[in-house]
């Protein structure tokens, strides 16, 4: 079927999203076309603001509202600046925050090391993490990268880099679904992983 250009454009755009195949992309597009309320308008506005309305925290590189230099967690006096939890993605911060059990601050790497995909230390926020640790304020770093090959590799690399700095290093306990993402782990599993974290300072 030959579709009018604007429809095909939206189908193509939806198809580029993770987890959305051509069928779902067409279904969503025609749903928007049919909908009587201003769903398409609301969606367009939200998409416009998505990038322009957000920025990265200059301290931990979590997502925050545009115009702020620090995210709410870094700006809060209630959070322990002595513990940093290192995660791969902003969604992992959300997952850990949902447990309500982590008193410290975060550092978002924005990915994991992957020699296969050519992602090296300079592609992640690793230098910024080491700079934070050198400030002397931090007593413990929890390596909360995903329980995957890349996540484990990244944790091992960070361990090597952090050890000379004399900061206590821990890793989330096993029990998280292997190969899965932290963001999909349920609250209880994350709570257990956090409570049972293992010391990696020596070896
Ligand atoms: Zn922050």
Image (tube, rainbow, N blue to C red):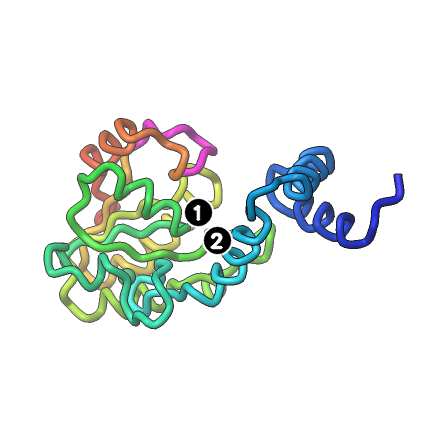
Q: Which of the 4 image quarters holds residue 145?
A: top left
| Secondary element at tag 2 | loop
Magenta residue check for 177 = yes
Residue at disc 1, CB closer than 8 Å to ligand 1: no
- Closer to the camera, 198 or 34? 34
Q: Quadrant of ligand 1?
A: bottom left
Q: Quadrant of the N terminus?
A: top right
Tell whether label 2 touches label 1 (CB within 8 Å): yes
The magenta segment: 174-181
Residue 168 horizontal/vertical position (percent): 18, 52
Of helix, strand and loop, which one carries label 1?
helix
Residue at image coords 21%, 42%:
199
Residue 123 drawn at (x, y percent): 49, 64
* Front-lying residue, 98 or 105: 98
- On the rendered structure, is 193 left or right of 43? left
Comparing labels 1 and 2, the label whose residue is closer to the camera: 2
Q: Earlier in the sequence, mark 1 or mark 2?
A: 2
Residue 203 among those drawn in magenta: no
Compared with residue 84, is residue 172 higher up or lower down, i.e. above or below?
Answer: above
**Marks 1/2: CA distance?**
7 Å
Q: Residues within 10 Å of mark 1 (few under 14, many from 20)?
A: some
Q: Which percent across, then down, holds residue 119?
A: 54, 58
User: In terms of image quadrants, where is residue 102?
Assistant: top left
Residue located farthest toward the front when viewing the structure as drawn = 36
Residue of label 2 = 113
Horizontal arrangement in the rendering, residue 26 relative to residue 129 (left or right): right
Looking at the picture, how far across and down is residue 200, in whole percent?
25, 45
Task: Identify the residue position indicated by label 1 in the image.
Answer: 153
Q: Main secondary structure of the magenta part?
A: loop
Q: Is residue 57 left or right of residue 135?
A: right
Q: Residue at x 19, y 71 (%)?
A: 135
């Amino acid at each position: 079927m030959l579709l009018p250009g604007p429809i095909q454009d939206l189908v193509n755009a939806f198809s580029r999203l993770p987890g959305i195949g051509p069928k779902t992309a067409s279904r969503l597009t025609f749903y928007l076309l049919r909908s009587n309320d201003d769903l398409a308008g609301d969606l367009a506005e939200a998409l416009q603001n998505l990038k322009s309305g957000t920025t990265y925290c200059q301290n931990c590189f979590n997502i925050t509202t545009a115009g702020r230099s620090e995210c709410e967690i870094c700006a809060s006096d209630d959070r322990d600046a002595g513990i940093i939890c290192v995660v791969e993605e902003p969604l992992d911060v959300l997952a850990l925050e949902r447990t309500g059990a982590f008193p410290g601050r975060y550092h978002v790497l924005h990915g994991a090391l992957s020699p296969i995909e050519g992602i090296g230390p300079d592609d992640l926020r690793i230098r910024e993490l080491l700079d934070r640790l050198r400030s002397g304020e931090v007593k413990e770093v929890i390596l909360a990268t995903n329980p995957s090959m890349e996540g484990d590799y990244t944790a091992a690399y960070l361990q090597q880099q952090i050890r000379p700095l004399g900061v206590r290093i821990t890793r989330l306990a096993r029990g998280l679904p292997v190969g899965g993402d932290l963001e999909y782990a349920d609250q209880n599993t994350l709570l257990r992983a956090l409570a049972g974290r293992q010391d990696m300072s020596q070896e």
